Amino acid sequence: MVLMSEYSFDIFFVVIYLFCNVGFGLYMSRRAAAGMDSYFLGGRRTPAWLLAVSGCASWFDVAGTMWIAGMFYSYGFKAIWPQWMWGVAMAAFWMAYMAKWIRRSGVMTGAEWMKTRFGNGPAGESARAAMTLVAVITTVSFLSTASVGIGKFWSEFLGWPPHVCSIVILGCTALYVIFGGMYSVIYTEFIQAGMLLIACVIVGVLAFNSLAGQSIESLAPAGWTNFLPSWKIPDAPEANYKLFGLMTIMWVIRGLLLSTSGPLVLYEFQRFLAARSPRDAAKVGMLWGAFFSFWWMYVIGIAVLVISRPDISVTDPESVVPAVLHAALPFGIRAILLAAIMSAFMSAFISTVNSGAAYLVCDVYQKFIAPKASNRRLVVAGYIASATLVGVGLLISSVISSIEQIAHWIFMAFGSGILIPLFLRWYWWRFNGWGSSVGMVTGVIASLAPTIFWPQTPLYISVPVILSLSLMGSFAATLLTRPTDPDTLDKFYARVRPWGFWGPVKKRVASQGALTPIDSTPADMVVALIAMPWIIGLYMAVMYLVTRCWTQLFISSAVVIVTSLLLYFLWYRKLPAADELINIANSETKA
């Protein structure tokens, strides 16, 4: 354990940075207190690039970075495949069509979206309630993960128990997110993104320089730079990864299902709802994915520094980040990196709290407790909801010791349990509120069962079972109950324009004269297929640059250049008009 006195300057720098952020969040509380739309969506006046920077900064979470950096250290470039479990290429689908669909709905939360899709009746209310339950579970789970990660990290520097570190840091961070709302989230994340960019470049340059005069192939285990998956990795540190090829198939299938189902993480959905227009929302999706390429420089840089420095000893792969900070960074630089890590934690933390509180306030408090509450009262309820979520997350984190333990449950078990209803709601008109609620509840129960009763069950067995049970629950409840009210379906389709199995609804809306051409289904699908190699190629190019793998860098760069040109003509030049929502509203009025 490192004594706090050894890093007094670094810790002092981080404390000053933390208090500056808290002060800014409290200052922004005056703007957030203007009302619910301002508190949770920033008034829908934020430019696309700033929303993308904010969302991208939210992905730089400490726990996830520690976990994934450990993966690349252990498995090399093959570690790109497990990233499909959280949708590494989802930005391709966001920019192609999903971001536009979300923004056209014009709601404030994902649970409120259920009302526009399934109506106000019992079926719609059940879907909204199920989505709120899922949202709260997701929020608490991510806060618990963040708490474990930040506590585990800072205990190495402060010499305090991990849970004590979590309480102190989460308590300070919670102040400005609770009072600042979405305004503090977006604008402080812009500042934090600057710190994170500096950190990524520093780590990338240090790793690049550490390989001067030598190759990564001569230092790393055989096959470390080969990204193609092996069917088996007998000596894999994690038991689920021993059948790596089978897991890769499952990761990719799950990742594609997730990417086409809309954002699973709540603050992602919120960023697109906060965009000024569907055109801006699509730009947010593209820029979000592009900006995130710097994170891969950081992750691979950490792994390279551990491999290239014989003086760095690592026994726990999740500890590679603090190990590098201990041994590989000079005075002053370490303070910047620590502040950047604090920024990463704060970005993910505040986004998660703000979006989770939006569900509790809009879909529980305002709907069932105080439907006539004033804006001021609702904002105060947002303060209380945010504080409650933080407290519950801290409580659960006290019994969890491993980031991987909870991350696998969130992304693979629990995440798989709710994917089927999230997917069907966009593409099948017959899918109704009962199917959504039963499918979600069935999936949640199915994801908890193996965790509680059969914790040693491999993921390649439990995940297909969870998906199958959720699928059966969704179809059974849908086909045994009445379809959604036609008027609700017509309004939803006329505004959002999803594609898939919407034939009867599309004919009905077209016959009413309320259907003006907006999107092309084949064009959206082509854009998504082109954007996937674009985004993956961009991430791989950054990592191959840091590791000096010149041949692979040339190939991945060529893929990025060719797909960028195609996207310019097939996507950018065909983005919706800035006033698209006004035109849709006019069409609905005429109808």
Image (cartoon, rainbow, N blue to C red):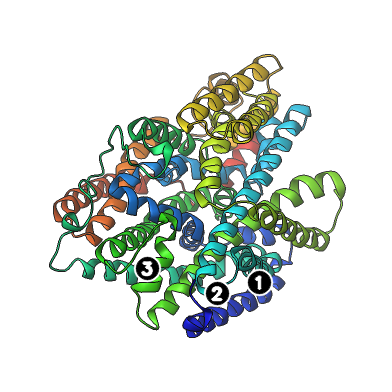
Residue contact between numbered discs 1 and 2, judged by CB atoms under 8 Å: no
How far across and down, in percent of the image, does residue 485 sit? 71, 24
- Mark 1 vs mark 2: give the one in front: 2
Disc on the earlier residue, 3 or 2: 2
- Looking at the image, is 149 positioned above or below residue 404? below
Tell me the quarter of the image containing the C terminus. top right
Residue that numbered label 1 is attached to? 172
How far across and down, in percent of the image, does residue 32 sit? 69, 66
Please name the amino acid that badge 3 sits on. Val
Residue that numbered label 2 is attached to? 158
Residue 422 shows up from this direction: no
Q: Residues within 10 Å of mark 1 (few under 14, many from 20)?
A: some
Q: Residues within 10 Å of mark 3 (few under 14, many from 20)?
A: many
Disc on the earlier residue, 3 or 1: 1
Instruction: Say what secondary structure mark 1 lies in.
Output: helix
- Mark 3 vs mark 1: give the one in front: 3
Please name the amino acid that badge 2 sits on. Leu
Disc on the earlier residue, 1 or 2: 2
Residue that numbered label 3 is attached to? 324
Residue 566 vs residue 455: left or right?
Answer: left
**Toward which corner of the image does residue 199 lie, by quadrant?**
bottom left
- Looking at the image, is 547 positioned above or below residue 505? below
Distance, label 3 to label 1, CA atoms, is: 26 Å
